[in-house]
Amino acid sequence: MSKRQIMSTIEGIRVIGFDADDTLWSNEPYFREAEEKFCDLMEGYLPRHSMQRELFATEIENLKLYGYGIKAFMLSMVETALKTGGDTLPVSVVASIIKIGRTQLELPVILLEGVEEVLKTLHGKYRLVMVTKGDLLDQERKLERSGLAGYFHHIEIVSEKRESDYRKLLRHLDIRPEEFMMVGNSLKSDVLPVLELGCYGVHVPFHTTWEHEQVDVIVTDPKFRQAEHANEILAWL
């Protein structure tokens, strides 16, 4: 039996969840562009690679306070700049960092190729939900600008994507784990937690992944699927 034939035997799915950032639309490249601009501002204080490590360490430390998203990223850039520059840091640098963040908040939402066609095909056949983490206001803004809101039965914006968060979602949707499939670009957030619950998890890698979301694991769970593009799930359902 071929791999595609094996994949096509999935039955009983009632609800399909989609991650948002870098699954439905491009997001991480914007953060990397903002980081490059930040390092340009701070080049007189630390080498670029050292400044990137300082910023990343600050971001991770601040996750428990600020969560994810552009505004949290902006605050971490300001904090890193102040910590690095000290009393010699001009106010103009802080103003420039805020401008970087505001510009990022106003960037267009660019859908990934073929995503809307996948949602259009599945809409009406399955309940579709968007499951994303990050800043509530920013995620709502991106969803509105994307034009995809009408395809989703339910929108879930959470501070983290842990087993407990997905378990609450399953209870809210009133479905069993084997009736749920999650599609996303992050093994750590979109796939591994749902597999632990007995759901199906589909990993659709994006070309750029934030270091915090990277995991070095080999997934052998029979309910795991790897896809180059989201449209591959259409052949499995």
Image: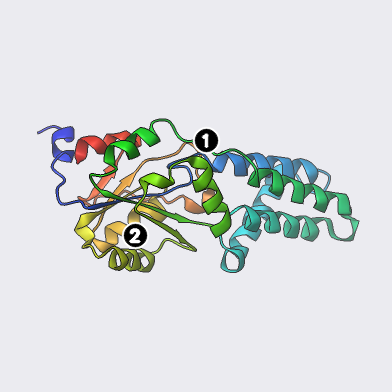
Q: Under tag 2, what secondary structure? A: helix
Q: How many marks?
A: 2
| Looking at the image, residue 194 lies above or below residue 220 | below
- Identified by mark 2, the residue type is Pro
Q: Quadrant of residue 47?
A: top right
Horizontally, residue 229 falls left or right of residue 109, namely left
| Looking at the image, residue 193 lies above or below residue 171 | above
- Identified by mark 1, the residue type is Ile
**Residue 193 marker:** 2
Q: Quadrant of residue 122?
A: top left
Q: Residues within 10 Å of mark 2 (few under 14, many from 20)?
A: many
Q: Which residue is mark 1?
A: 110
Mark yes or no: residue 206 visible: yes
Horizontally, residue 220 falls left or right of residue 162, namely left
Q: Residue at x 59, y 38 (%)?
A: 108
Residue 130 is situated, as x and y percent measured from the top left of the image, at 39, 52
Q: Nearer the viewer, residue 17 or 83?
A: 17
Q: Residue at x 21, y 56 (%)?
A: 179
Q: Residues within 10 Å of mark 1 (few under 14, many from 20)?
A: some
